[in-house]
């Protein structure tokens, strides 16, 4: 008998539709994806240290003026286009498909974001991770990342002292993958951790139940089995391995 169809069987993947939580500020628009809401009865919009995954849009010639973040780790992932950053530490940085930025806000970090008039329209993810402790030392990481290889996961950030190019101060690993139509990969996993997957572009079929996860939809894997993902069309997918038992703080200004 197929255990997935048996009475009381736990689903392999909890799916969530495109978020309906958004803010429209004209040239700057954001959609909040809350991984905890994928699990029925879960009492937290976040999922352990992963607070929220924000789909952000900026039109050309948009300035988000200097503002502060505290007690959260903010990752800017830009698959196409450019996001321009400056801060009170004197950094002027460009995040693009070849670079990743992690703002370890700690006790307080001020920054501004901008697209110039001749930049392309920007669509990106800004990822909010809850740190393990309050009042940590603030800082910024901005590093080149490995070239993407089609149909292979690219490990982009993880906990401190790991082997990813950049780090956050809690137990979250982040990967991306460009999948050709028809290609299949296995979701990243770690023993005892759960995996959250978000389809940035395209659509995929995942797991033993052949669950469809479409454009800007997401899924949360909460069992120990390997989960395969097959692209129904050319797709861009991100995945997070999350230690649900990690200690977290909830005083970030956005993610909480």
Image: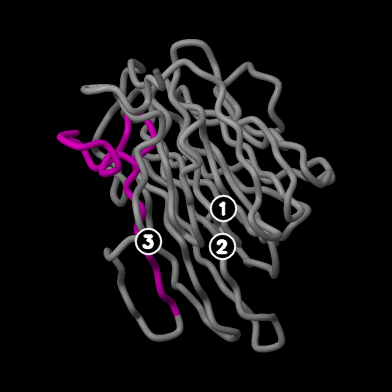
Res. 59 visible in picture: yes
Per the image, the residue denoted by label 2 is: 124
Instruction: Indicate how the structure is coloured in the image.
Output: one colour
Q: Nearer the viewer, mark 3 or mark 1?
A: 3
Position of 162 compared to 205: left or right? right
Give the mark count.
Answer: 3
Badge 2 element? strand
Residue 57 is situated, as x and y percent measured from the top left of the image, at 50, 72
Q: Residues within 10 Å of mark 1 (few under 14, many from 20)?
A: many
Is residue 52 depicted above or below 54 in this figure?
A: above
For the N terminus, give its image quadrant. Answer: top left
Q: Is residue 168 left or right of residue 166?
A: left
Residue for badge 1: 76
- In the rendered image of this protein, does residue 183 appear above or below residue 98? above
Magenta range is 28-51
State which tag comes first along the sequence, 3 or 2.
3
Q: Rounded to the nearest whole Å, what is the CA distance between mark 3 and mark 1?
A: 20 Å
Q: Residue 27: name its quadrant.
A: bottom left
Disc nearer the start of the sequence (2/1): 1
2 and 1 marks in contact (CB < 8 Å): yes
Q: Position of residue 227 (x, y in %)?
A: 55, 28
Q: Mark 3 to mark 2: distance in Å?
A: 15 Å
């Amino acid at each position: 008998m197929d255990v997935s169809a048996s009475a009381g069987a736990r689903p392999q993947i909890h799916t969530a539709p495109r978020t309906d939580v958004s803010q429209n500020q004209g040239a700057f628009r954001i959609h909040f994806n809350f991984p905890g809401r994928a699990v029925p009865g879960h009492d937290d919009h976040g999922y352990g240290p992963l607070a929220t995954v924000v789909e952000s849009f900026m039109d050309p010639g948009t300035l988000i003026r200097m503002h502060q973040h505290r007690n959260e780790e903010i990752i800017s992932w830009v698959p196409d286009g450019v996001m321009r950053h400056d801060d009170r530490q004197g950094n002027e940085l460009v995040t693009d498909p070849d670079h990743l930025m992690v703002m370890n806000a700690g006790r307080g970090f001020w920054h501004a974001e901008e697209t110039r008039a001749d930049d392309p329209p920007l669509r990106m993810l800004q990822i909010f991770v809850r740190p393990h402790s309050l009042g940590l030392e603030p800082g910024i990481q901005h590093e080149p990342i490995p070239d993407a290889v089609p149909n292979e996961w690219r490990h982009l950030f993880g906990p401190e002292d790991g082997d990813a190019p950049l780090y956050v101060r809690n137990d979250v690993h982040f990967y991306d993958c460009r999948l050709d139509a028809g290609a299949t990969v296995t979701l990243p996993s770690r023993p005892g951790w759960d995996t959250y997957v978000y389809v940035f572009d395209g659509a995929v079929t995942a797991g033993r139940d052949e669950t469809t996860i479409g454009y800007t939809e997401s899924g949360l894997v909460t069992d120990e089995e390997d989960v395969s993902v097959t692209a129904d069309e050319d797709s861009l997918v991100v995945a997070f391995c999350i230690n649900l038992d990690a200690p977290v703080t909830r005083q970030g200004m956005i993610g909480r």
